[in-house]
């Protein structure tokens, strides 16, 4: 990262000037270092939603929304999706390089050996209401991990941070599956070491003591791809939340729990669930699909089709291209129930409209990754309240990698955004009997 260039800002009121470094990243827009702005001119910057603000420097994930580019540690998502596994991507995000065969074998074995929860934590689930949302359970249980693992909690020790990362990546599928089973009154199922990462999750989700269960390889492959595509996504709301919480030296379990809470918001992690709810509403309305397409085109109608376009990707979500093929393969190879099949048929008809209708094509309103992941989850028989839980399970490696990077960054400081104050000032207190 170069900072030889500068930018000078002049205050036309006072005539004062401040010269600030212009930082040049390895990719992406140049960044003005405004550290001296307040000190020399007495001004803050105003950027709601931090849409034009780089809150940190990072070497983990790069995305270019205009060109539809997503890379982990410099590797294009297309190559990782084709050749890699989720755990290999986890290793890459944590360690900044692809593993050798021996490194990957050791990493996979380490994750496998950490999948069990402390038995006291199993009893922790019974403290929730039977109808608790799985995300509510996940927030609580992940935060409670800090009460069970005191042995490697020195956040300034690199080895301790790595052990914590292993524990989180390993235990998150177990926590997610147990959250689902508790909410549905099903007996808890423990992980099995002979299964791989995604097979193990499917086993813990769907197996029953009364029957033999073997995870479907196609479902495991589809889930592994979804996990890779959701592993990290730069400084999004939940990742920024993890960094902000971690900047106070909070323990990593608390920081990740805060990320889960942020992801729970429907504007962030609930998009694929919104897709399925939209399909249900379309089918239950009894109106033709074209009615909803016309409404989406009407600028005076607030209705919009969920799962199309993306806030960051202005061209095409590169993840959608990758997941679309698996989605269609899954739908072709699986048998679905009557109501489920109707939803899937509506989804495919909607996809056809979006890919061929000039209105959608001209505006780049293509199906995004949430559109296809929602359909895949539906076809797999995963309930809607688990969609965001699986998102959190996949994103855990991104959160902990970003947190680990921040803890090793000598320039990192406790987060303390400033504000544009618009309230009253210098008001005198009036005794209550005189108001």
Image (cartoon, helix red, strand yellow):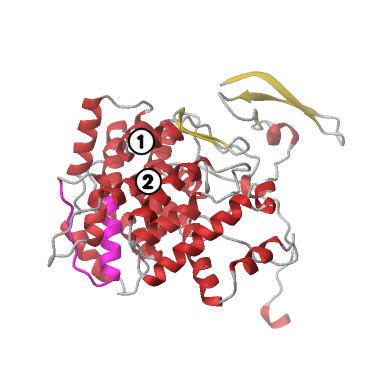
> Does residue 146 show up?
no
Image position, residue 323 (x, y; %): 44, 46
**Residue 64: which quarter of the image?**
top right
Q: Which residue is mark 2?
A: 227
Q: Nearer the viewer, residue 130 or 357?
A: 357
Q: Is residue 198 left or right of residue 405?
A: left
Bin the neighbour count of mark 1 within 10 Å (Cα to Cα): few under 14, some 14-19, many 20 and up.
Answer: many
Q: Secondary structure at mark 1?
A: helix
Q: Is residue 92 above or below residue 422?
A: above
Write the residue at 22% across / 57% down.
204
The residue at the far bottom in this view is: 433
Instruction: Judge the density around disc 2: few (<14), some (14-19), many (≥20) Cα neighbours within 10 Å.
Output: many
Q: Which residue sits at x=51%, y=76%?
A: 284
Q: CA distance from mark 2 to mark 1?
A: 9 Å
What is the x, y in percent for residue 38?
69, 36
Report x, y in % for residue 95: 35, 29
The secondary element bearing badge 2 is classed as: helix
Residue 183 among magenta residues: yes
Q: Identify the residue shown where x is 39% and y is 61%.
A: 378
Residue 150 magenta-drawn? no
Counting residues from the start of the chain, the first of labels 2 and 1 encountered is: 1
On screen, residue 19 above or below 416:
above
Task: State the residue at coordinates (30%, 46%).
Answer: 168
Q: Is residue 55 left or right of residue 217?
A: right
- First to last magenta residue range: 171-193
Q: In the rendered structure, are the residues bearing label 2 and label 1 in contact, judged by CB atoms less than 8 Å apart?
A: yes
Residue hosting label 1: 89
* Residue 422 lies in quadrant: bottom right
Task: Report the front residue among 170 and 164.
Answer: 170
Q: Is residue 256 visible?
A: yes
Q: Which mark is residue 156?
A: none
């Amino acid at each position: 990262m170069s900072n030889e260039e500068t930018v000078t800002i002049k205050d036309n009121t006072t005539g004062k000037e401040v010269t600030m470094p212009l930082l040049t990243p390895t990719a992406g827009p140049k960044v003005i270092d405004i550290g001296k702005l307040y000190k020399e001119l007495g001004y803050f910057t105003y950027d709601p939603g931090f849409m034009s603000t780089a809150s940190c420097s990072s070497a983990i994930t790069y995305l270019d929304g205009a060109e539809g580019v997503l890379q982990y540690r410099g590797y294009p998502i297309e190559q990782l999706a084709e050749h890699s596994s989720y755990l290999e991507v986890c290793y890459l995000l944590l360690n900044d390089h692809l593993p050798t065969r021996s490194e990957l074998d050791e990493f996979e074995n380490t994750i496998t050996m950490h999948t069990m929860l402390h038995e006291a934590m199993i009893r922790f689930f019974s403290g929730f209401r039977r109808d608790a949302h799985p995300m509510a359970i996940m927030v609580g249980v992940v935060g409670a991990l800090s009460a069970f693992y005191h042995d490697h909690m020195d956040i300034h020790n690199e080895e301790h941070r790595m052990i914590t990362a292993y524990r989180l990546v390993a235990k998150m599928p177990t926590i997610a599956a147990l959250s689902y089973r508790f909410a549905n009154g099903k007996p808890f199922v423990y992980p099995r070491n002979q299964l791989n990462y995604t097979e193990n999750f499917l086993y813990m989700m769907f197996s029953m003591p009364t029957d033999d269960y073997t995870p479907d390889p196609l479902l495991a492959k589809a889930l592994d791809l979804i996990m890779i595509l959701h592993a990290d996504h730069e400084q999004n709301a939940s990742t920024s939340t993890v960094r902000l919480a971690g900047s106070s030296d909070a323990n990593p379990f608390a920081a990740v729990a805060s990320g889960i809470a942020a992801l729970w918001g429907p504007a962030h992690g609930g998009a694929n669930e919104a897709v399925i709810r939209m399909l249900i509403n379309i089918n239950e309305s009894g109106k033709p699909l074209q009615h909803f397409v016309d409404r989406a085109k009407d600028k005076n109608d607030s209705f919009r089709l969920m799962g199309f376009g993306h806030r960051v990707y202005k061209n095409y979500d590169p993840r959608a291209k990758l997941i679309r093929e698996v989605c269609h393969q899954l739908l072709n190879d699986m048998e679905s129930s009557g109501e489920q099949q109707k939803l899937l048929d509506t989804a495919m008809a909607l996809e056809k409209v979006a890919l061929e209708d000039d209105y959608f094509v001209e505006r780049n309103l293509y199906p995004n990754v949430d559109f296809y992941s929602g359909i895949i989850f539906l076809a797999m028989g995963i309930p809607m309240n688990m969609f965001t839980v699986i998102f959190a399970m996949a994103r855990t490696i991104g959160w902990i990698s970003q947190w680990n990077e921040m803890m090793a960054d000598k320039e990192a400081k406790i987060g303390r955004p400033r504000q544009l104050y618009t309230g009253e000032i210098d008001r005198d207190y009036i005794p209550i009997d005189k108001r």
